[in-house]
Image: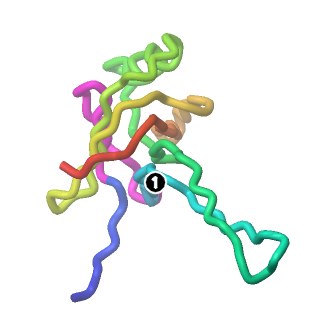
Amino acid sequence: MTAIGRPLESVEINGREFQCVGDAAGTRDLGGYSNEYQSNGNPNTGRMIMTPKGWSVPSQGLEIDDAIGDQEYIQSYADSGAKNIDFVFNYGQGVSYQGTGGLVDTLEFDPMTGTMPTAFMGPGKLTKL
């Protein structure tokens, strides 16, 4: 079966849905562990170093509507330093992931395009819904 790629369609931030720009991939890191192999003094032996990491959805552009205060809504969560925001990432065709975390990086609205790049991170792992 051939896999069909598609961008992230929308993000829900504590229940409020934002449409995603179509040219942003919506890459995701489910979280868990990153592994690194380290050799010992004897090159025939080594060990696996497992480092825990949280989940992330970096560099995602969201459509922002000034008339309904979208930028202020998102910025209020960033200003509060909240790290327990509920996110749902909708990839279409019934594929969605849920995670709890926070907004990271700079939130700069571009009024010319009506979009704002955002990045999301949190502890633990994203869960497929």
Residue reaching furthest to the right? 41
Amino acid on which disc 1 is placed? Asp
Residue 45 vs 104, above or below: the answer is below
Residue 16 left/right relative to 126: left
Badge 1, how many Cα within 10 Å: few under 14, some, many 20+?
A: some
Q: What residue is shown at x 39% (from left), y 18% (from top)?
A: 73
Q: Is residue 94 above or below residue 100?
A: below
Stretch of the chain drawn in magenta: 9-24
Which residue is labeled 1 in the image?
Answer: 29
User: 50 or 72: which is nearer to us?
Assistant: 50
Q: What secondary structure is found at the residue carrying circle 1?
A: loop
Relative horizontal placement of residue 59, taking residue 27 as reference (left or right): right
**Residue drawn at the location 33% of the way across and 38% of the way down:** 99
Q: Is residue 65 above or below residue 48?
A: above
Task: Work out which quarter of the rendered image holds the N terminus and state it.
Answer: bottom left
**Residue nearest the observer in this picture, 91 or 85:** 85
Residue that extends furthest to the bottom in the rendered view of this protein: 1
Q: x, y percentage for residue 81?
A: 52, 15
Q: Quadrant of residue 122?
A: top left
Q: Is residue 17 magenta?
A: yes
- x and y percentages locating residue 24 in the rendered image: 46, 56
Quadrant position of residue 87: top left
Name the residue rendered at 39%, 57% in the picture.
22
Image coordinates for residue 127, horizontal then vertical, percent: 27, 47
Q: Residue furthest left?
A: 94
Which residue is pictured at 70% across the width and 71% down the height? 46
How many labels were placed on the picture?
1
**Left/right of residue 25 with respect to residue 38 in the rendered view:** left
**Image x and y of residue 37, in percent:** 67, 68
Magenta span includes 91 = no
Direction top: furthest residue: 80
